[in-house]
Each structure stands twice: as structure tokens, then as C-alpha cells.
Amino acid sequence: MAEKSVDALASAGEFTRRLVASYADHFHPQRESTDGGGEAHPLSTALKSLDLPISGNQVQQLLSVSKELQVRGQSTVGEGLSWGEFCVCCVEVLELKKKYPVNGDESGADRGVTNHPPKTAPAVMNCHASRQSAEVFLGGSCNPTTWRRDHAIPALQAEGVTYYNPQVDEWYPELIEVEERAKDAASLLFFVIDSQTRAVSSMVEMAFFAGMGRDLVVVVDDILKDSPRIGDDQLSSREVEDLNRGRAFVRSLLETGGSLLALSVQDGVKASSEILKGGMSVSQYSSSTRCLSVPRNHGLGERLALLKQVFLMYDTNRKGSLSLQEAVLAFRSVHIDTHAMYNQLGCKKVDQTIRSNELLSRYEEQGLTFDDFCMVYAELRYAQVSEEAGNGSLLVGLAYLTAPIQWISGWLWPTPPTHPTQTSHYDVFLGGSCGHTTWRTEIAVPTFRQTGVSYFNPQVQHWDVRMIPIEREAKEHSDVLLFVVCGDTLSVASMVEVAYYIGAGRKMVLCLVDISCDGGTEIEGMKLSARAIKDYNRGRAYLASVANKNRVPIFTNIPDAVHRAMHLVRGHYLPRSPSGTSV
């Protein structure tokens, strides 16, 4: 949108006036798209400039709703967000920040500032280390990455923080036990999932520790879409999509589990040092690098989708704008006090005639476009939030979203699974490999229907990141988690989920099959290199080890796994059939 039109909207009120400069700076027409690039998206940097930082995953939640509206021909969004949509995003993030502040946000009392003197000789632990414990375990992507040597280790040494570095020039099996002791003894685990490696095992390992509730500081970078190369392997768009889906699940698990998701290695190392030197847990730490912690039952972007649908309901002639009277009705439908609207915008209502300032006069003549509607909503909602916060309220206005969002979900997802509600309950969650797989419809679903076992099936035709909170809610309301990781799928996100819920101690049955190492192996049309197969099977091997140590039953035969899940629900076991294999 042109800068002139942004300036014209600057007179809406106190809140939106503050947003104009940030929008103009970050969403100007000359800015190139950053989709798939190394830079943060303009929405991320714009919100950070307003002291409303959110993570990359949360940015994608907002953009995904905006993109959905655009695809349906119901928005004029370009590569980023329109001005009005930006206003709604800002007020939504602000509401959540006020309602669910990160510890220490308001007073700063919990920051990692301490009078403890720095240590003079940091201890370093490598492969030949003794049983001395290090404060930080440097986990995550290894060869060929150099983030430990270039950034983490120098910074930790400067702060006098001890660390264990598992990256060695020559690895041998005896190091497994040494590394395990270092992880167990470390006060904090610092993981980096970078864009130079598939990092499948690292994601699985980190998810397991997140499920356990360990103190974690994590940096997660997506595989870049414009240069998808891992070593000598040129990655297909399909493989990049699967690896980045796994990373999206990692971010989601961290954001709802109390871990710290840092924006860069430097930010993560700084935060780790402050946490340790301040004698804090990760949950007590807050800083500018900490992203908003969104509650599990709220999906960012829902407000924008609701407003668009309400706008369309009242734009009965499909002229792309609402009269002022239509806008009043639309605002009432989303619990905006219309008397506050007139007061806030400086107009008076006399004998059903609206006499207004210059902005309202323009609305009377031209109507409110969706951008205008969103901007005015953001201004009025900000006034409500400020008043509620001043009265000590818990922002109960958010409650109005529940019913409309359940109703609108059918419009957003034409063929969604049954959405769990607060009272929904399932015997089994059917997790694991999706895509072209048919094990749910051909094996699990018929078996459970015959025996009266209720289930939640997350497999949909077109998946996107907005499904993550829906699936997570269903898992939380399921007695048994059945996960099937097939040998003809990559299933990175599924392995991440399994590891997390094993760490959380959930009742689970796992069917796990390695990818075939035969020459010319293809997965969903992708020809995998020997290195790729090794990476994906290493993740499976680590997952099998974690499951075995935590007494999770593991099968390589799907019917046997389904059989075990059914009898876990019934509260008793039957012997495994000869075809079942325990790994």
C-alpha cells in the first residue's frame, strides 16, 4: 500500500498512530519478499520494533491466515500484510502479552542481572572429560557446522560458564555414555537446529528433553528454500517441506512448554549465560530475545479470520465496503461497544444522524473497506484492553472468540478433522506418518470401530501449521497415543512428536520402520542419497533407544501395534502375535 494511504489513516487514534511508522518502515512496496530467505519476515521485525516480539512460528500462523484469505479472493494482501491486517495482528499480540506476560516482563525484576563475580577459569569438557559436570550442554547440529567454535564457546568462556562440547573430530562409541552423563548433569541444555544439516536426531533428542521439562534454550533455523543443499545433496522441495514441518513442530512444542526459543545463536548464548549466572530457571528468565508465550487454546490469526468473515456477512452487496451503519452492526457482533466507537472517533449521534470528524465523514461518503474496518477495530479494542487492564480485569473480552471461531473453522478448513472441544475425549490418537499412507483407514479405523474404541484421526488432504494446536489439543484429551512411523515416509515431524510425548510420560504405542538402504530408494517420489537415508534412520535409531529406555512398546508391524493400543485402552494386555517385533 502506498505511503500516502498509510499517512491518511494515521488520525484513527492513539494506538494506530503508533503503528503507522513501523508499518511504513517494514512493509513499504520496494521491500523484497523474504519468504524462504535468511532475513526475518517484515511482520517479525515490525512487531519487535513495537516491543511485541513473536517467534517465526507465530509469524507463520498469522501469515497463514492472511494467505488463506488472499487465496479465497477475500483480501488484497500483497507479499506481506495490509495495513488493517497489521493493526489487528498488533492488538491481538498486545492482548495476549498483557493477559499472559512472560515472568518478569512487567517489572524486570527477574532479569539475569546478578552481583555474582565471574569465574576466572571456565572448565571445558570434551570427549576425554572427567565426571566433572558442565553447566551447559551444547547440543544440536554438528558437522559441518561451526556455531560452537565461532560463537558459543568464545562467549561462554568470556562469561566464565562451563560447557560440554560433543562435537569432536573423531567419534567413537564410548562417547555415548560420556555424552549421556554430561546431558544428565548439565544445568541447561543449549540446542541449535541449523539450516546446514537435516538435524533429524537433534530434533528428536531436543523434543525428548522438552517433554521431560528440562531447562532448554533453543535456536531453530529453517532449511532455506532458495538454496536447499545439505553437503553434496540437493534437496527437493518436498524434502525441504518435510524438514521444515519438523522444525515447525519443534517451535510449537517449545513455545507451549516453557522453554526459551532464541532468535539467533548469539541471543541464545547470551540468555544461557544470564540464566546460569542469575541462578534462574528458564521459565523465570525474560529478555528482549524471549518471544511471546501463547496459551495452547489460542491460535494467533484467529481474530483476523473472524473479522474477515464478519465483514463479509455485513457486506451483503459484495461491494467491498461497509456503510457506517453496517459497520456499527458488525462491531456489535464482535462485542465492540458502539458508543465507545463514536466517542473514540470523535463523532456524535443525534436523531439517528451521524455527525463526525473528517475521518468519519469520509467513511460516511465512501464506506469502510476491510482495511478501514480492521484499523478502527484495533483502535477500539485497544481502548477496551486499556480500560480492562486499568480495572484489573483478566481481559474477559477474549472469551467472545470461542463460539465464532468454532463456527468459522468450517469455512477455513473445507475438510477438517473433528475439532476437539474442551469436553472432547478420545481413547486413541492416531499419530504418525500421513501423506499417501493408508494405515489409518485400512487398519486402525476399522479395528477401533469394531471394538467401540474412539479415536482422533489428524490426517487431512491439505495440512498447514494451523493444524498444530488442534492436533495438540486432541493428544491432550486422548488416553493412548498410537504413533506409526512408516519406512516409506520421512516422518520428521512425527518422530519429533513421539520423542516429546515419551519425555512427558504419556501412555504410548509405537510402530517404527527404518527406511530401506537399498540402492535407488525413493520416498514419495524423492530419490534419497545414502547420506540422507543414514540421517533419517539415525533419527529412528535414537527414537527407538529413547522409547526402549522408557518402556514404550515398539513394533514393526502395524496390526500388532493397533492391537496393543486397543488393549491398553481396555486396561489389559494380550500376548503379541509372532509377526510382531519388539525393537
Image: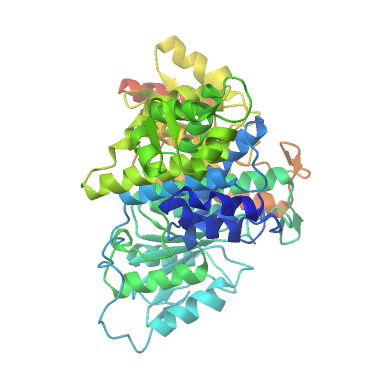
Relative to 11, 231 lies left or right: right
Q: Residue at (45%, 45%) from the top-left corner?
A: 499
Can see residue 8?
A: yes
How far across and how far down the image is residue 391, in percent?
21, 46
The colour scheme used to paint the residues is rainbow
Q: Does residue 322 sit above or below 447 in this rendering?
A: below
Q: Residue at (53%, 56%) from the top-left corner?
A: 20
Q: Nearer the viewer, residue 532 or 541?
A: 532
Q: Nearer the viewer, residue 547 or 576?
A: 547
Asked where in the image residue 195 lies, by quadrant, the reply is: bottom right
How far across and how far down the image is residue 403, in percent?
38, 24
Relative to 218, 275 lies left or right: left
Can see residue 479?
A: no
Give the farthest residue toward the left.
392
How far across and how far down the image is residue 375, in percent?
50, 43
Q: Does residue 148 sit above or below 321 in this rendering?
A: below
Relative to 571, 267 lies left or right: right
Give the farthest residue toward the right.
520
